Image: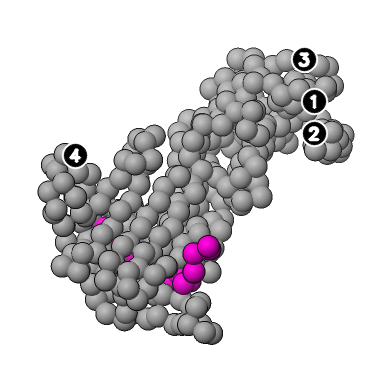
Amino acid sequence: MTKYFLFAFLTFGLLWSCTDGELQTPGDEYLTGDQDGSYSVDMNGVFKNFGKVTQATSSSGGSDISGTSSAGGSISITLPQVLATGNYTELNGAMITIMTQDGVFTNIGMDGAPLSFNLSITSVNNSQGFVSGIFSGSVMNLTTDEIVNLTNGKFVKIQFTPVVNIDRVLEAKFNDELFDFSTNANAQGITTGAIISGENTNQVQTLSLMIPGGIGVDTFTEEDLVEIKVNLGTTNNPSDFYSNYDPVSDTYLPVVLTITSIDLGEGDTTGRVKGTFSGTITKFTNGVPGEEIIVTEGKINVPIEIPEG
């Protein structure tokens, strides 16, 4: 993989024509600083602007954040996963390739050994499709073997096309911010006790809606002991969650879950659940509620799955 990667970029570098360096030229200044679409980095202290044309892609097979300069140069940061907030290094597959008039630079050396590269993706919006972050590290000029230090790397709201999940939908707005938990979303149990759950892989979060008495096509509230539980990633503790129910005080905050349809499949073993939900959740600490979060526009369209085993 490493040899193929280097060959591909070396070949691309030979096809790329040498032009002026990536110092600012007229027309670049509108994509500097913190403006949407800006993309820049200092290479050995020299500012390089790659904000002329920017774009990104995001998929489970690999993602890319790229930009070009007015002088014909380019930059590309790749990850072997979907775009998600967090810190990444060369150890978990973060890679960078830069092309300027001075050659092709990458954080993988000619011997295949990775050079230090630190990437922090600070924001990913999968509804509108943009990503922001900062980066630094070292790259090698594959022609001269020169090591170049990268500092002050930054990209702001680079646009990408969100992956549309047509098979599963589990999402809601939390204080007007949309969160998508459609990954692996499903419904289990259904008649005697049900749970609808899913994951937000971009934020490493989970959401579950639990109905102890089971569900049908009907409207359920906290009086039916409906519990919403969600990890919003406010800390690194996976058990740090928000809910409308506190077992210490046996308190339920108001929720509304409406199941609009349950379509059972062949043999009543598969099918699909559709509905909506809303309510109020908080983080309870020893029975004491914290700041409340309002859940609105919750959507459910998930398959019924039978647990294995």
Give yes or no for residue 19 being in the magenta stretch: no
Q: 190 or 278, which is in the foreground?
A: 190
| Magenta: main secondary structure | strand
The reply to whether dot 2 and dot 1 touch (C-beta < 8 Å) is: yes
Mark nearest the camera among 4 and 2 is 4
Q: Amino acid at mark 4?
A: Thr
Q: Which residue is mark 3?
A: 146
Which residue is pictured at 14% across the width and 53% down the height?
Answer: 250
Residue 7 image-quadrant placement: top right
Q: Is residue 35 left or right of residue 46?
A: left
Which of the two labelled residues, at mark 4 and mark 1, occupies the earlier sequence position? Answer: 1
Identify the element where label 4 is drawn: strand
Q: Label 2 vs label 1: CA separation?
A: 6 Å
Q: Which residues are magenta?
A: 295-309
Which of the two labelled residues, at mark 3 and mark 4, occupies the earlier sequence position? Answer: 3
Picture coordinates of residue 201, whole percent (x, y):
49, 49
Which of the two labelled residues, at mark 1 and mark 3, occupies the earlier sequence position? Answer: 1
Coloring applied to the structure: one colour
Q: Label 4 vs label 1: CA separation?
A: 50 Å
Identify the element where label 3 is drawn: loop
Q: Label 1 vs label 3: CA separation?
A: 15 Å
Identify the element where label 1 is drawn: loop
